[in-house]
Image (tube, helix red, strand yellow):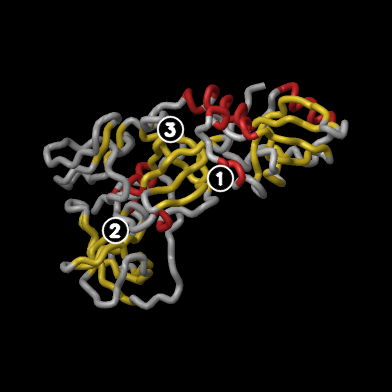
């Protein structure tokens, strides 16, 4: 039976499986998971499977641990967290008690060989956000294997922090942007969140909606009203990026890709973060065009070309998509 590869914390729990079920999983090479109970002085993770002791030697705690490319902190922080593995054997400990021998490294090698290495830039895959840095979010793309989602790949409109878009533990969809020098995936999500026209179609002139201040300039305030869609309101004192406001939609101008807003209330008591709304949820992306057909400003990307913003480009059907090219971490794209 073909193994189904998932993000960590998504596999069948081994904690309460019977001895017969554990033997079957060991024989088939099924990936299971259990919560690591300790990282002991022998530098091994300890577990309990069906009432039987189980250990994972340091070299088997992650692919690369055996060669010294994995630090202790990356292993000891597994304590108290669900951890995936394959059962490599059933031994006896120094007291003669049965003890399962586990390997997360082998689960990761299988995941790479049979799943991740079959994917190409443009393929869409599920991920789980594991931690956030100022320059982006790290995501589990399978069996705890990490990939970076840079901040400038989270949105067409500028955001101040990856936490403006995602949170730790959140399950998201991403597309593969490319691989870095070490062969690790770099991800993007902005192409899945809709074009200007797709997002603008959700709004009507005359509505008052909740928005989030993204930047305050001398000439006005950019307010995001949906992921990948922001409008410009008049300058208003006391506003700061990340602040929730209510805005009146004064005008929607597809030919300029602009939305004119009027700030109604800039003292909303509750913080706000938009839920991710996906316009693409599966398959492969080759090309993506954010711009409207009427607008001379072109925002589009092609694999493997760099991000292009050019006035001479012809409009491409909105059902074709692409991924963004690399830009320095921490940079943002303004509408």
Pointer 3 or 2: first along the chain:
3
Pointer 2 or 1: first along the chain:
1
- What residue sits right under mark 2 in the picture? 230
Instruction: Kindly give the residue lying farthest to the right in the view shown.
Output: 96
Q: Residue at x 43, y 46 (%)?
A: 278
Q: Residues within 10 Å of mark 3 (few under 14, many from 20)?
A: some
Instruction: Kindly give the residue lying farthest to the front in the view shown.
Output: 41
Label 2 or label 1, whichever lies nearer to me, is: 1
Q: Residue at x 29, y 55 (%)?
A: 158
Q: Residue at x 87, y 31 (%)?
A: 96
Element class at badge 1: helix
Distance from the alpha carbon under mark 3 to that under mark 1: 20 Å
- What residue sits right under mark 1 in the picture? 73
- What residue sits right under mark 3 in the picture? 184
**Which x, y percent locates residue 230?**
29, 58
Seen in the picture, residue 261 relative to 98 is either above or below; the reply is below
């Amino acid at each position: 039976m073909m193994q189904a590869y998932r993000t960590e914390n998504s596999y069948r729990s081994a904690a309460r499986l019977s001895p017969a079920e554990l033997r079957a999983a060991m024989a088939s090479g099924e990936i299971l998971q259990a919560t690591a109970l300790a990282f002991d002085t022998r530098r091994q993770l300890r577990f309990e499977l069906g009432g039987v002791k189980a250990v994972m030697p340091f070299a088997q705690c992650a692919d690369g641990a055996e060669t010294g490319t994995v630090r202790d902190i990356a292993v000891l922080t597994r304590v108290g967290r669900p951890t995936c593995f394959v059962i490599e054997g059933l031994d006896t400990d120094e007291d003669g008690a049965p003890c399962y021998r586990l390997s997360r490294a082998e689960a990761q090698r299988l995941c790479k060989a049979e799943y991740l290495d079959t994917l190409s830039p443009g393929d869409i895959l599920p991920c789980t956000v594991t931690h956030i840095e100022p320059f982006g979010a790290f995501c589990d793309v399978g069996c705890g294997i990490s990939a970076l989602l840079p901040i400038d790949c989270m949105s067409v409109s500028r955001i101040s922090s990856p936490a403006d878009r995602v949170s730790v533990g959140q399950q998201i969809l991403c597309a593969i942007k490319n691989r870095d020098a070490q062969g690790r995936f770099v991800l993007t999500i902005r192409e899945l969140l809709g074009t200007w026209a797709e997002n603008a179609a959700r709004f009507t002139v005359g509505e008052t909606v909740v928005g989030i201040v993204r930047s305050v300039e001398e000439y006005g305030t950019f307010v995001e009203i949906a992921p990948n869609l922001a409008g410009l309101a008049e300058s208003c004192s006391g506003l700061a990026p990340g602040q929730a406001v209510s805005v009146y939609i004064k005008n929607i101008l597809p030919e300029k890709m602009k939305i004119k807003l009027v700030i109604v209330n800039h003292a909303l008591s509750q913080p706000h973060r938009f839920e991710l709304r996906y316009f693409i949820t599966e398959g492969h992306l080759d090309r993506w065009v954010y711009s409207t057909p009427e607008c001379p400003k072109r925002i589009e990307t092609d694999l493997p070309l760099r991000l292009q913003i050019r006035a001479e480009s012809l409009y491409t059907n909105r059902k074709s998509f692409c991924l963004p090219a690399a830009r320095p971490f921490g940079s943002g794209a303004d509408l």
